[in-house]
Image (cartoon, rainbow, N blue to C red):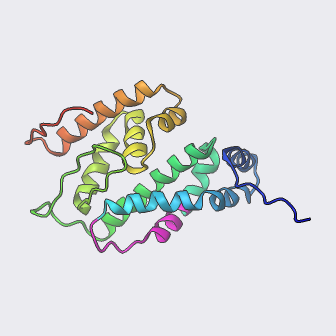
Amino acid sequence: MNPPTPSPPDGSTVTRLLGAAQAGDGTALDRVVDLVYDDLRRLARGHLARERAGHTLGATALVHESYLRLVDSAAREAVDRAHFLAIASRSMRQVLVDHARSVGAAKRGGDLRRVTLLEGSAAVEMDPEELLALDAALEALDERQRRVVEYRFFGGMSESEIARVLEVTERTVRRDWVKARAWLYATLYPDEDDGRTES
């Protein structure tokens, strides 16, 4: 008789391993990454979809570069799978921002595409200069609103996932998203009226 096929690891396995990492298990975080690697690649592809065509980083490289930054913060902060992925998404954004700085962002110009910030899953190409401007604007936001934008726009997380990570209600997440989105748009494009209605 063949042994039963093991079921795929669930969120409780990741949660347990994150607890082990916080307790000092040096291999636990590597095992977490192995378990959520497909999710990390999905996040990386989402981030890269917002970059201009011909970006020198691919999804695998972005996952690996962000992992180097992720190790310490994730081991200290993450409490479950959603929280770990949120931290990973934030790390990926920082890798891309640093990359934009290192290649020397072009001056704002005619091929700039506006960031609508409508949906976290929307693929929006961003000029490196615009990415840097968005990063600076995000840093000026209230911390919780900044995280809502990071998790939803960059990480593609749902309101319920964000609410769980931030330990607030979904209504609070929705309110923070609307406020942050309006403030960011006004900051990035002060001479424009977007004419959008809130969704």
At 23% from the left and 56% from the top, the residue drawn is: 130
Say if 183 sits above or below 86 in the image. Answer: above
Does the magenta portion include 61?
A: yes
Q: Is residue 69 visible?
A: no
Q: Is residue 151 visible?
A: yes
Does the magenta portion include 160?
A: no
In depth, the one of 84 and 41 nearer the eye is 41
In depth, the one of 167 and 102 nearer the eye is 167
At 92% from the left and 65% from the top, the residue drawn is: 1
Q: Residue furthest front?
A: 1
Say if 18 sits above or below 31 in the image. Answer: above
Residue segment shown in magenta: 52-67
Q: Residue furthest right?
A: 1
Where residue 82 appears, as percent x and y from the top left, is 56, 44
Where residue 22 appears, as percent x and y from the top left, is 71, 46
Where residue 33 appears, as percent x and y from the top left, is 63, 59
